[in-house]
Amino acid sequence: MKKLMALFLSVFIATTVMAATKPAPVAPVLSGTMVNGVRVITVAAKKYEFIPNPIVVNVGEKVLLKITATDVDHGIGIKEFKIEQKLPKGSEQAIGFTPDKTGTFTINCTEWCGLGHMAMKGKFIVLPVIKK
Ligand SMILES: [Cu+2]
């Protein structure tokens, strides 16, 4: 009986320690800065990525992406929000919209930009409004 108690206790301690050391889930950090109620996010498109990645916003807030292709021509597409914009090299393009649904969406490059074009993707994360 003592052995059983010892076993039970050691299992209990082990699971408690494991639970305590398990890293807490990291909440995504919102991108950009708020300017007069608009979330303004400066984005760079370059072979073969979008920076920052992911781009994180809140649902229902106005978003302004100020996006520049820095090396060659690129494009940005987020089909769930009907966004498709050519990004001529070196020319900042402003894209404003208000995300109306939550989730994780794929950002695609929409202009052929080289061998890595098909893999040039980013994540666009729309967070739900957290009720307090
Ligand atoms: Cu491309």
Image (cartoon, grey):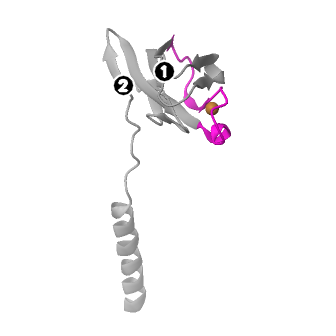
Dot 1 falls on a residue whose secondary structure is loop
Name the side, left or right, on which 72 lies relative to 67.
right
Dot 2 falls on a residue whose secondary structure is loop
Query: Camera-side residue: 46 or 120?
Result: 46
| Corner quadrant of residue 110 | top right
**Residue 98 at what x, y percent from top left?**
51, 13
Q: Quadrant of ligand 1?
A: top right
Q: Is residue 70 magenta?
A: no
The residue positioned 38% from the left and 84% from the top of the image is 5
Q: Is residue 113 above or below residue 62?
A: below
Name the side, left or right, on which 112 lies relative to 40.
right
Sequence-first disc among 2 and 1: 2
**Residue 1 at what x, y percent from top left?**
41, 90
Q: Is residue 12 above or below residue 44?
A: below
Determine the residue located farthest toward the top in the rendered image: 36
* Residue 119 shows in the view: yes
Query: Camera-side residue: 77 or 29?
Result: 77
Q: Which numbered marker is on residue 32? A: 2
Label 1 is placed on what type of residue? Answer: Val
**Residue 105 at what x, y percent from top left?**
59, 31
Residue located beneath label 1 in the image: 59
Magenta range is 96-120
**Residue 114 at what x, y percent from top left?**
64, 37
| Corner quadrant of residue 112 | top right
Q: Which numbered marker is on residue 124? A: none
How far apart are the two marked residues, 2 and 1, measured between alpha carbons?
Answer: 15 Å
The residue positioned 65% from the left and 26% from the top of the image is 111
Q: Is residue 6 above or below residue 60?
A: below
How busy is the neighbourhood of tag 2: few (under 14 within 10 Å), some, or many (20 plus)? some
Q: Is residue 102 magenta?
A: yes
Q: Is mark 2 within 8 Å of ligand 1?
A: no
